[in-house]
Image (spheres, rainbow, N blue to C red):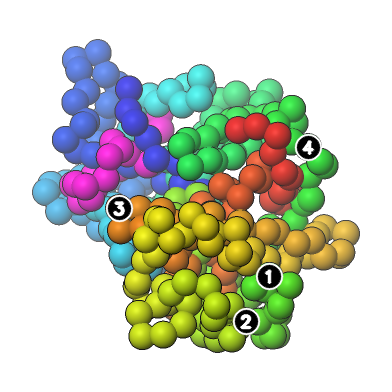
Amino acid sequence: RFNIFLDTGSSNVAVKRSQWNPDSSSSSSSVLFDSPECKVCDSDGRTTACQWGNPFPARLNASVCGYGVDYGGTRNMMGGSLVSDSVTFAGFTVQQEVFSVDEMFPAEQPFDGIVGLALEGAASNPTYTPTLFRNVKTENPGISAVFGLCLTQNGGMLDFGWLNESKISEPFQFVNVSHDVYWNMAVQDFAVGSQSVGLPSFTYHRNVDSVGSFTDSGTSILILGPVIYDSFQTLFQTSFCNLPSVCGNETIFNGACIADEVMQGAISSFPSLNVTVTLIDGSPAYLEVAPDAYMLKGDNGWCLGVISGAGVGVVLGTPIYTSGYYIAHDIDNGRVGFARTTSC
C-alpha cells in the first residue's frame, strides 16, 4: 500500500525505490532493455522516430529498461528502471502494469509515488508505457473512461471510472481536449477581476514553442507564459496598488509574502483571476480562481501562487481545483468538464 500523489499533468506511474519491497509472492519482473516492450517509444506503437529520444538502459542496471521524466519544466525529475507487476488502484486491479521504480524521487516529498492521469501522448519517457487508466479500462471494459476530481486545502476526492454528480450544484460545462497529451483546452483570455490582460487568444494556445494551456493537479500554483505573466503583473499593480505588498520595492511579484495578521483583513479585497475558455458549443465560459486559492498560505505568510514559465500558455494547477470546482476528465469523448461543487 502506497501513499500516492495524483497528477493530471503526467501520464506514468512511479514509486520510490526505498518503498519498493516486493515479497516472494509478487509477480514483479523487470522490463529488459533488449525486450520489444522497452523499444516502443510512442503511443501508436511505432518503434522508430521516437519523439522524446530513444529508449535507454537503466543507470544502475544496463540490462533493464530505463525511465526518466522532468516535472514542472525541469524543477523536479525522476529516473529509474521499469518493472511490471499487478497494481490495484481505486478498487481496480491491473495484472501487468508497467511502472518506474525510481531512484531520483525527491526525498523531501511526503508521498511514496505518483500516478499520472494525463493522456497517452505524455506516456513516453522515452519508452511508451500504457497509462494506468487505459489498462484499467482494458481489463474492466464495463467501466466508463472518465474520472472526477475535486480538491480542498486539506485533501480531496477522486471518483475513478464514474462522475459523482451529487457533488455538483450545476451542470458540467465541457471543453474539448485539443491535444492527446495533457488535458489541453482552448483558453481565450486571462483576466484580473473583470479586466482582461489584453492579449490575443493565440497566446494561450499550443504552438511550436508552447505546450499550450491545460489543467494539472500536480502543480500547486498557476503558471503563465512570460508574456501573459508580464501583462498580468502590470495590470495587477496598476489596478490594485492599494493592496498590501502589491507595489513598492518588496512585492508579492518578487517573492515577498504578506504576514497573516495583515492578510486576514485584506484577502477579501484581492481580485479573483478569471480564465475564459471555449465550450464545446462554441460559447465562452469563465473559470474563477479565488483569491485564497492563488494566494498561498505558508510558514512565511501569504505568498503569490502565480509564476512565469516558458513554453506554456496557462497551466491551471491546484488553485483551479481548490476554487470550488469538481472537474470531469472524459477520456473517450476527449473533453474536460467544470462544475461548482457542493461538497468535496
Task: Say which label, 2 or 4, has the lower sequence index.
Answer: 4
Q: Residues within 10 Å of mark 1 (few under 14, many from 20)?
A: some
Q: Hey, which residue is sitting farthest left in the picture? A: 60
Task: Name the residue located 74 percent from the left edge and 36 percent from the top edge.
Answer: 168
User: Closer to the camera: disc 4 or disc 1?
Assistant: 1
Q: Residue 90 or 119: which is nearer the viewer?
A: 90
Q: Which mark is residue 299?
A: 3
Tell me if residue 324 can be seen.
yes
Q: Which residue is mark 4?
A: 169
Distance CA(mark 2)–CA(mark 1): 10 Å
Left or right: 98 in relation to 135? left
Name the residue that disc number 1 marks.
193
Quick one: label 4 or label 1, which is nearer the N terminus?
Answer: 4
Q: Are marks 2 and 1 in contact (CB under 8 Å)?
A: yes
Q: Could you tell me how far apart the alpha carbons at marks 4 and 1 are, in whole angstroms? A: 23 Å
Which amino acid lies under the numbered mark 3 shown in the image of this protein?
Answer: Asp
Q: Earlier in the sequence, mark 3 or mark 1?
A: 1
Q: Label 2: how many residues lie within 10 Å, few (<14), some (14-19) or many (20+)? A: some
Residue 175: % across, % down? 75, 56
Looking at the image, which is closer to me, 62 or 174?
174
Give the labeled residue for mark 2: 239
Instruction: Report how far apart the C-alphas of labels 3 and 2 lie in the structure.
Output: 28 Å
Say whether residue 31 is magenta.
no
Q: Which residues are magenta?
A: 94-114
Res 210 seen here: no
Name the quadrant containing residue 140: top right
